[in-house]
Amino acid sequence: MDDCVFCKIVKGEIPSEKVYEDSEILAFKDINPIAPVHILVIPKTHIKSLVEFNDDELLAKMFKVIKQIAKDQNIEESGYRVVTNIGENGGQAVKHLHFHVIGGRKLETR
Ligand code: 5GP
Ligand code: ZN
């Protein structure tokens, strides 16, 4: 999608600090991290949110990547959080499906 920030990151039109890439998936550091480790994992194809996402195989691959990133970033043992915000009430700012991988400090519970 032309006006989507994450599509622009996929196309290299906006720079990003990539931590993982394959033909279908890209992971890069969040520009405004809320923890020492804050990575976004996205499908390269523009999909709005989890609601529109029906590719079970790709979903499984994304979670495999998430697990590998946690290992690579050394947060597997200390623990981390995986979050996807959906729509208005979910507080989704960027309308391109992404999983936040957040760790490296003790995260708030409510
Ligand atoms: P959301 O609120 O949609 O779940 O999260 C969007 C995330 O994307 C935010 O954490 C925000 O900091 C991040 N973000 C927005 N624009 C950019 C960008 O241009 N580059 C990177 N690396 N992250 C971005
Ligand atoms: Zn997009």
Image: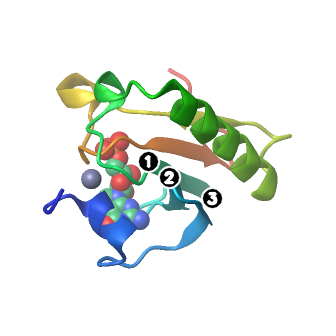
The kind of residue on which mark 3 rests is: Pro
The kind of residue on which mark 1 rests is: Pro
Question: Do callouts 3 and 1 mark residues in contact (Cβ within 8 Å)?
Answer: no
Q: Which residue extends farthest right? A: 77
Q: Distance between the residues labelled 2 and 3?
A: 26 Å
Residue 68: horizontal and vertical position, in percent? 75, 48
Q: Is residue 67 left or right of residue 48?
A: right
Q: Of the residues under marks 2 and 1, which one precedes in the sequence?
A: 2
Q: From the viewer's perspective, is the residue at label 3 or at label 1 nearer?
A: 1
Q: Which residue extends farthest left? A: 3
Question: Which numbered disc covers residue 68?
Answer: none
Front-most of residues 80 and 19: 19
Instruction: Please name the residue shown 62% across and 66% down the image.
Output: 19
Residue 62: horizontal and vertical position, in percent? 58, 40
Is the residue 62 above or below the residue 3 in the image? above
Is the residue 80 above or below the residue 37 in the image? above
Instruction: Please name the residue shown 32% across and 59% down the image.
Output: 6
Q: Mark 1 points at which residue?
A: 43
The answer, for residue 90, to whether it is visible in the render is yes
Q: How far apart are marks 3 and 1 (CA)?
A: 23 Å
Question: Do callouts 2 and 1 mark residues in contact (Cβ within 8 Å)?
Answer: yes
Q: How far apart are marks 2 and 1 (CA)?
A: 6 Å
Q: Mark 2 points at which residue?
A: 24
Question: Which numbered disc covers residue 36?
Answer: 3
Front-most of residues 85 and 19: 19
Ligand 1 is within 8 Å of the C-beta of the residue at disc 3: no
